[in-house]
Image: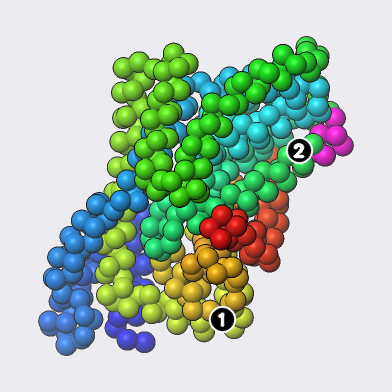
Amino acid sequence: MEINDYLVMAMFASFIALLLSGYPVTYCLAGTSILFTGIGYFSDQYLGTVTGLDFNYFGLAVTRIYKTMTNWVLISLPMFIFMGLMLDRSGIAERLMISAQELFGKVRGGLAVTVMFIGVLLAASTGIIGASVVLLGLLSIPAMLKQGYRKTLALGTVASAGTLGILIPPSIMLVVMGDQLSVSVGDLFLGALLPGLILAFFYIVYLIVFCYLNPEAAPLSPDRRPISFRVVFDVVKRVIPPLFLILSVLGSIFAGIATVTEASGVGALMATALAIAYKKFNFSVLKEVLYSTYNTTAYIFGILIGATCFALVLRGLGGDELVERLLMSLPFGNYGIIAFILFVVFLLGFFLDWIEITLIVLPLVAPVVGNLDIAINGYGVVSSPEIVWFIILVAVTLQTSFLTPPVGFALFYLKGIAPPGIRLGHIYKGVIPFIIIQLLSLFAIALFPQLVLWLPALVYG
């Protein structure tokens, strides 16, 4: 091994050590980059090594940061965040929950199905896991427990429904992934739509079957009105606004009318219009939403800047080549290497947020996947079909890791807003069936890449 290989491993070890010490991720990334640029420079000057690092890398880092901050695609991030937060304040989800309960009131497990249905709409409206899990938990957990639902069933339903936001577009994670790997975000949105809806469908099927076989886990409410035209009309009336928003944003992207950035602006404007229409808009609401948007955006872009510096120095040391050599030397076939990468991503998802994994790990492993001898049919219209398929596999894997005990992020979001008497053990037990469904879905996407590539090919072909 050369000096650069040792420096790469030491750089990773230093980053992990700083991260575990409790320092903010942005400082860990940027600080490690500065430290190892200095180590490489002094090593070359006084030890006679050739690391290739010098202080010109600081100038390169400034150039990279400038390009990042002026990236047209990334402008959509604060717009989508604003859209999701404004929808949260508009009360749309609460209105849907009340009316949809009436529609599914006479179905065994109807309230759980309602939560999953609202989760799909929130996922397609916000693209933010934390917001979806917290909102669904506050709205539905007290109602489910009051109706006599088993705690584990109620908590598992809310947690799994909330994590759909990472996969179903407009997912902000897919925006960042597409930018990092120079892949069309429109292709990723289309590729993720069918797997996300299939996953939600399997969730609902499981809930209906489980509640039918275990009626004591989901008792029917005695005060539900029979389904009538009035009930159906109320549900349809309250579903139309978010559906119109979703179709306006995603439809304009898929039809080629607007770019992702332009569509995000339309979504932010329409979310504000809905808040005004529902009389939920005032100066204090606007101030709160803007503050939360600035806070979340600054967090993401701070990590993005730190990761840009980290990746620049890591590549200068030959880190990408070292990772490729290590992966290609594994005694597995092509699909075995992909399975190993997904397993590593799954484990990292226990300790790192999706932002760090997307910005640090994904750019290192994606070129390896692109060089594997895998024939994925892009139908002649999807560019880099192997990378698009691989990104969706990573997205589903991260979604699974957010639900997996002991440190899944969605579990802690849920515990933070759960009523008294709810223990982490209840949440852990509740999510296990949904994790199994996610793993089966991941296996299906790996086995049938057409689940990802068929819709983009149909739309663009």
Specify the quadrant that holds the N terminus.
bottom left
**Does the rendering let one see residue 418?**
no
Closer to the N terminus: mark 2 or mark 1?
2
Compared to 277, does 217 lie above or below?
below
Q: Camera-side residue: 17 or 217?
A: 217
| Residue at figure coordinates x 63%, y 51% from the top left | 194
Picture coordinates of residue 101, whole percent (x, y): 70, 22
Q: Name the kind of residue labelled 1 in the image.
A: Asp
Picture coordinates of residue 452, whole percent (x, y): 60, 59
Q: Are the residues flagged by discs 2 and 1 in contact, CB closer than 8 Å?
A: no
> The residue tagged with tag 2: helix, strand or loop?
helix
**Does the rendering let one see residue 168?**
yes
| Residue at figure coordinates x 45%, y 82% from the top left | 325
- Quarter of the figure with residue 431: top right
> The residue tagged with tag 1: helix, strand or loop?
loop
Tell me which segment is drawn in magenta.
Answer: 209-215
Q: Name the kind of residue labelled 2 in the image.
A: Leu
Compared to 152, does 286 lie above or below?
above
Residue 393: in magenta span:
no
Cα–Cα span, label 2 and label 1: 40 Å
- Which residue in the structure is indicated by mark 2? 207
Picture coordinates of residue 370, whole percent (x, y): 49, 74
Q: In the figure, is residue 1 to the left or right of 388?
A: left
- Which residue in the structure is indicated by mark 1? 373
At label 2, counting other C-alpha atoms closer than 10 Å, the crowd grade (few under 14, some 14-19, many 20 or more) is many
- Quarter of the figure with residue 223: top right
Picture coordinates of residue 330, whole percent (x, y): 55, 81
| Residue at figure coordinates x 59%, y 22% from the top left | 238
Q: In the figure, is residue 58 to the left or right of 166?
A: left
Specify the quadrant that holds the C terminus.
bottom right
